[in-house]
Image (spheres, rainbow, N blue to C red):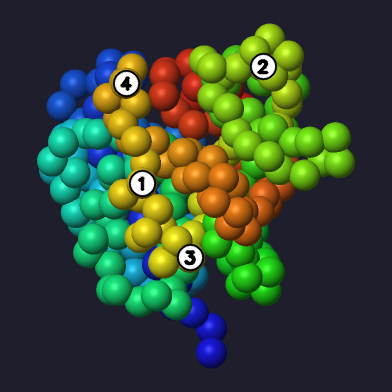
Amino acid sequence: MKPTVYGIILAGGNGSRMKLQGVNKVTSEFKNKPLIYYGVELLNGIVEKTVIVIGAYAESVKKCLQSYQVEYVVQKERLGTAHATQCGLNILPHDSSSIIIVGYGDHMMYYQKKTIQKLIQNHIDDKVELTFVTSYYDDINSLAYGRILRDKKGCLIGIIEQKDASEKEKNITEFNAGLYCFNYTFLKESLPKIKLSPISHEYYLTDLIKLGIQEGKKVYVYKVPFHEVGVGINRQEDFLLNNI
């Protein structure tokens, strides 16, 4: 019997770099549709339930999605992406056999349903704890995303954020696209192990990749062409970068 799949979409951030007034950035329109619609519609028909993690300007997100069947959980304190994911996980059924898809409300515009279905199927077939999407972009330094570290044989050995990367590592063109597929048990047991960043005072979801590798878990990469990933919307100029 196939495991039940649930979705968590993170949409609680302040989005201060977007310089919006009174609304969450995921309500901003991209190609005549609010950003948050893309993630909800992508997961519709694939997951049993979609949880939207809201926080800043929460009512604007609810109003935007009033015609969709989703559930909400409020991230009362914005303590990072891992904390937001924990909030979403808290209201999902305690089903150790289930699978959890986690994505960002501002970065799910280009994915196709068949890609997500294939991602999930590979995750199940390979009996993996964590699968995450990567892509390639030549002008990588303009995106400020985490770089994928591999050994000489091409095997995954880690991930490093751009701000922490050496000059050589900054030139790595494979990056973390920010879409994850977790086994429920791995996610539940690993989230509490993430340590608070002493710089940002946040808990980062990407730390689960490092943690999984360190603990010898099966952490796999699912490569997706850049035209099906695009750029997450953090600044107004990112809309222009998505002219793919």
Q: Residues within 10 Å of mark 1 (few under 14, many from 20)?
A: few
Instruction: Please name which of the two marks, 2 or 4, marks the residue nearer to the observer.
Output: 4
Q: Residues within 10 Å of mark 2 (few under 14, many from 20)?
A: some
Type of the residue with mark 1: Lys
Please identify the quarter of the rendering in which residue 202 is found. Answer: top left
Please identify the quarter of the rendering in which residue 136 is found. Answer: top right
**Residue marked by disc 3:** 183
Q: Foreground residue, 47 or 163?
A: 163
Q: Is residue 33 left or right of residue 153?
A: left
**Residue marked by disc 2:** 170
Type of the residue with mark 4: Pro
Which circle's residue, 1 or 2, is located before the other in the chain? Answer: 2
Q: CA distance from mark 1 to mark 3?
A: 16 Å
Query: Residue 233 location, x and y as percent?
Result: 44, 28
- Please tell me whether mark 1 sits on a helix, a strand or a loop: helix
Residue 193's label in the rendered image is 1
Which circle's residue, 4 or 3, is located before the other in the chain? Answer: 3
Which circle's residue, 1 or 4, is located before the other in the chain? Answer: 1
Question: Quick check: marks 1 and 4 in contact, CB under 8 Å?
Answer: no
The answer to whether 73 is drawn above or below residue 114 in the figure is above
Q: Check the picture and name the quadrant holding the C terminus.
A: top right
Type of the residue with mark 3: Asn
